[in-house]
Image (cartoon, grey):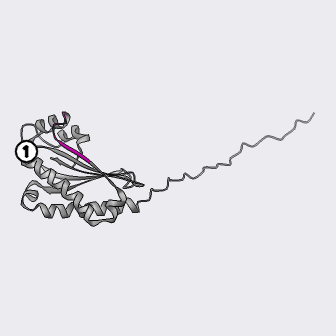
Amino acid sequence: MKINLTDLTTKIEQQDYLQDLESIKYTDLNKSKAKRRQAAEKMVKEIAAALKHNSLAHIALEVTGQRPVTFALEINLINLPYANYKKIANFFEEGKDYPVFVYFETQSEHLNASNFRIDQLATEDEISQNEELVIDRLAEAIEEKLTLVREYKKPEPAVKKAETKTTKAKKSTKTKKK
């Protein structure tokens, strides 16, 4: 699938793309490799279907619990989430068709300083030629990001050194003699 910048931004603006949102408990996904693979398989199959129909897609998996995280797959030209679609124009020319890629997004307060990470997961060819490989790759990426979320420690706020200047104005203690 190839798409030009105008069509891409119009579709994103009008939300003219396949959208899906599933929820799962953190403990279910974290403890079960089979559940991670099952979630990855569903997400990749939906992306594959969108690609076959020349459609964009945003497929999300919301993980609820003590350390919530949202995983998403998006079909895009560049590693920018749909939320930042207006910035895509800075990187591409109008009127040219570009190949799309599948990006894996992770969003959580317990991930990193920006609470967000995006990585290229696959090309369209990789999905059409070896869907199972992409499913395995996504399941591993989900496991890796869950580990990051579980082990994340927020950085301590920088403590400013108290600037204590003890410069006191000298008082004049002279007394006038009469």
Q: Is residue 105 magenta?
A: no
Q: Position of residue 19 (x, y in %)?
A: 20, 43
Taking depth in this image into account, of 94 and 177 the one nearest to the observer is: 94
Q: Position of residue 117 (x, y in %)?
A: 29, 53
Count of numbered circles on the image: 1
In the current view of this chain or complex, which residue is farthest to the right? 178
Under circle 1, the secondary element is: loop
Residue at position x 11%, y 52% from top?
A: 48
Q: Does 40 sit left or right of 157 as displayed?
A: left
Residue at position x 29%, y 63% from top?
A: 143
Q: Which residues are magenta?
A: 14-21
Q: Position of residue 24 (x, y in %)?
A: 31, 54
Judge the density around disc 1: few (<14), some (14-19), many (≥20) Cα neighbours within 10 Å: few
Q: Is residue 78 visible?
A: no
Quadrant in the picture for the C terminus:
top right
Residue at position x 34%, y 65% from top?
A: 31
Taking depth in this image into account, of 82 and 142 the one nearest to the observer is: 142
Q: Is residue 5 visible?
A: yes
Residue beneath disc 1: 54
Q: Amino acid at mark 1?
A: Asn
Q: Position of residue 81 (x, y in %)?
A: 24, 45
